[in-house]
Amino acid sequence: MQPGEKKKLLSRLARAEGQVSAIRRMVEADKYCVDVLVQVAAARGALARVGGVVLENHLQTCVASALDDPTARDEKMAELMDLFTRFAGLGKGA
């Protein structure tokens, strides 16, 4: 991962950590459920964006470098299908 990209990613993660801490404080203070849910959705969105950046980096580096080797390519394709199955609800049974 490029240093600038990594810095942005770490910044996003710090924001997500802050959101999760805020959610904890809201629950401890018995805040209105809808307000808590809005913050949960915001934190999930922030983490989803982090995941998207990491996935894009993986595709541009690890997967791209495996394309010229049929065995490595097949391994990376299986890995990607597993990722999509686990994180996007795609694949078997979907």
Image: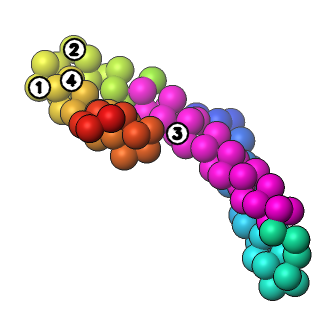
Separation of marks 3 and 4 at Cα, in angstroms: 19 Å
Dot 3 surroundings within 10 Å: few (below 14), some, or many (20 or more)?
some
Q: Amino acid at mark 3?
A: Val
Q: Nearer the viewer, residue 64 or 78?
A: 78
Q: Position of residue 62 (x, y in %)?
A: 35, 31
- Determine the residue located farthest toward the top in the rendered image: 68
Mark closer to the chain start, 2 or 4: 2
Q: Residue at 48% of width from left, 35% of height from top? A: 55
Please tell me the numbered disc located at residue 68.
Answer: 2
Separation of marks 3 and 1 at Cα, in angstroms: 23 Å
Dot 1 surroundings within 10 Å: few (below 14), some, or many (20 or more)?
few
Indicate whether 31 appears above or below 80.
Answer: below
Q: Residue at 40% of width from left, 40% of height from top? A: 89
Q: Which residues are magenta?
A: 34-59
Please tell me the numbered disc located at residue 54.
Answer: 3
Mark closer to the chain start, 3 or 1: 3
Q: Are marks 2 and 4 in contact (CB under 8 Å)?
A: yes
Name the element at disc 4.
helix
Separation of marks 1 and 4 at Cα, in angstroms: 5 Å
Name the element at disc 3.
helix
- Left or right: 20 in relation to 73: right
**To which residue does mark 4 refer?**
73
